[in-house]
Amino acid sequence: RIAANIDDLSGGRFVLGVGVGWSAQEYAALGVPFERRGAITDEYLTAITALWSADLISYEGELVSFGDVHGPRPAHRPRPPVWVGGASRAALRRAVTFGDAWHPNNAEFGWLRAEGVPTLRSLAAAVGLPVPALCPRMRLRLTDTPLAEDGRRAGEGSLDQVLRDLDTLTEIGAEIVVLDTNPDHPSGRRPASTDWRMLETVAVRVAAA
């Protein structure tokens, strides 16, 4: 309901991003079995997409059950896009089954090209489903001078280095790239104005190109 309401209020601009998470401690705090996170996510996605599909829905599953539930329906038709994150084979299978896009986070370019994208395509072909779009997330941290390429992470460095990273992702097949200004640790947080300037700097150069 929350997602459908946001999609409606935003005029159909909502994207549902989904990931099972990696922290066993977070699952323990919620009293949810960590080892069942994949099955739980799959069934929840089945139930959510069913609720978006019609005005009155009933669903009977192992973990989720409801009868004759009414909307609200999202503005998107038939439903808002679902982006599935993760780099495991199970995550890629989930992206094929439920996702409009696969949304890997800070994945190495070599792995994306040699393993990630080919695995996504083979899993889709095996079940006769469309290959989800590649819409990766890349950390963004602009520096005044170029960083040494040895050890540099994608999305970090001078503007030219970041633009080359975007070109590489495009060559691999990315349709959309999300630039993430969130640091690895809270101690690395910057003022929001700094993050906005970095995003604007990249956007202006990309638009000009």
Image (tube, rainbow, N blue to C red):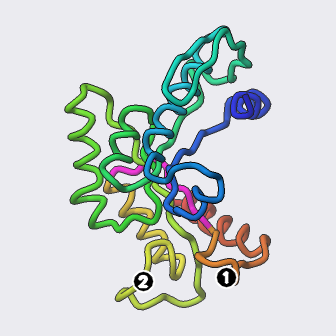
Extent of the magenta region: 173-180
On the image, which quarter does residue 14 sit in? top right
- Element type at mark 1: helix
On the image, which quarter does residue 204 sit in? bottom right
On the image, the x and y values in percent for residue 41 come to 50, 40
Instruction: Find disc 2 in the rendering and name its residue.
Output: 152
- C-alpha span from label 2 to label 1: 17 Å
On the image, the x and y values in percent for residue 200 come to 68, 65
Front residue of 45 and 190:
45
Name above or below for residue 158 compared with residue 105.
below
| Residue at horizontal 57 percent and vertical 49 percent from the top | 32
On the image, the x and y values in percent for residue 118 come to 22, 49
For residue 188, the mark is 1
| Residue at horizontal 25 percent and vertical 41 percent from the top | 121
Give the residue type at disc 2.
Arg
Front residue of 197 and 29:
29
Residue 177 inside the magenta-drawn segment: yes
On the image, the x and y values in percent for residue 195 come to 71, 71
| Residue at horizontal 63 percent and vertical 17 percent from the top | 66
Main SS class of the magenta portion in the image: loop
On the image, which quarter does residue 1 sit in? top right
- Element type at mark 2: loop
